[in-house]
Image (cartoon, rainbow, N blue to C red):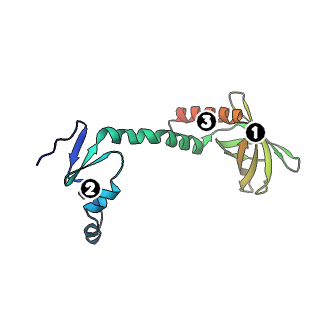
């Protein structure tokens, strides 16, 4: 008996072959259509008699649902290579003039005039090219003892965080990342 499928649904008989491609003979023998019934549930798959169909409309929605998450992760982990003036104040009261090597949403690498102590708390102000100062508290997470250090920081206010994230998003777009 031939089944008619709704428009936009394509029938495939090669899903099992595609799924099992690359598995050894003994692995293919242990994975059968029953496994497909459990592994291919969810949007995009429609079960028919003795075969599976792919709902193209549902499959097209899956990547767009993940776009927001991927973009936020890309922005969060984007490190903008940039030399910006950074004022660093240590808990011992030292005020250091530094230069950024790269900046991300919650951290930066710096050129520092002196070695920094791992785990030390610092206060910092980064001057963005837009003229916006970004102030925050941070912790030294690495120091190479040769004038470079990494700071994990949190902006002092949500508004500053928003300005930093917006600037980083612009830089990311300009760089094509």
The answer to which image quadrant residue 165 occupies is: top right
Neighbour tally class for label 1: few under 14, some 14-19, many 20 plus, Cα within 10 Å: some
Is the residue under label 2 in contact with that under label 3 (CB below 8 Å)? Answer: no
From this view, report whether residue 6 is shown above or below residue 51: above
Residue that numbered label 1 is attached to = 156
- How many angstroms separate mark 1 from mark 3 (CA)? 17 Å
Looking at the picture, how far across and down is residue 106, in whole percent? 66, 44
Q: Secondary structure at mark 1?
A: loop
Residue 113 visible at all = no
Looking at the picture, how far across and down is residue 33, in whole percent? 25, 60
Residue that numbered label 2 is attached to = 18
Neighbour tally class for label 2: few under 14, some 14-19, many 20 plus, Cα within 10 Å: few
- How many angstroms separate mark 3 from mark 2 (CA)? 41 Å
Q: Secondary structure at mark 3?
A: helix
**Which mark is nearer the camera, 1 or 3?**
1
From this view, report whether residue 30 is shown above or below residue 49: below
Looking at the picture, how far across and down is residue 43, in whole percent? 35, 45
User: Reading the chain from its start, which is encountered first: label 3 or label 2?
Assistant: 2
Is the residue under label 1 in contact with that under label 2 (CB below 8 Å)? Answer: no
Q: Nearer the viewer, residue 38 or 161?
A: 38
The answer to which image quadrant residue 27 occupies is: bottom left
Looking at the picture, how far across and down is residue 63, in whole percent? 41, 41
On the rendered structure, is 167 left or right of 85? left
Q: Secondary structure at mark 2?
A: helix
Residue that numbered label 3 is attached to = 168
Neighbour tally class for label 3: few under 14, some 14-19, many 20 plus, Cα within 10 Å: many
On the rendered structure, is 130 left or right of 76? right
- The residue positioned 55% from the left and 44% from the top of the image is 73
């Amino acid at each position: 008996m031939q089944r008619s499928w709704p428009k936009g649904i394509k029938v495939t008989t090669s899903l099992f072959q595609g799924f099992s491609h690359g598995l050894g003979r003994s692995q293919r023998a242990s994975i059968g259509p029953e496994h497909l019934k459990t592994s291919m549930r969810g949007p995009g798959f429609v079960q028919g008699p003795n075969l599976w169909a792919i709902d193209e409309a549902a499959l097209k929605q899956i990547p767009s649902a993940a776009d927001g998450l991927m973009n936020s992760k890309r922005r969060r982990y984007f490190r903008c290579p940039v030399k910006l003036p950074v004022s660093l104040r240590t808990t011992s009261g030292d005020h250091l003039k530094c230069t950024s090597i790269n900046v991300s949403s919650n951290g930066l690498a710096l050129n520092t005039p002196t070695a920094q102590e791992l785990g030390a708390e610092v206060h910092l102000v980064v001057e963005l090219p837009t003229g916006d100062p970004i102030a925050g508290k941070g912790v030294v997470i690495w120091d190479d003892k040769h004038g470079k250090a990494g700071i994990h920081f949190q902006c002092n206010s949500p508004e500053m965080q928003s300005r930093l994230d917006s600037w980083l998003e612009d830089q990311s777009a300009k760089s094509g990342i």
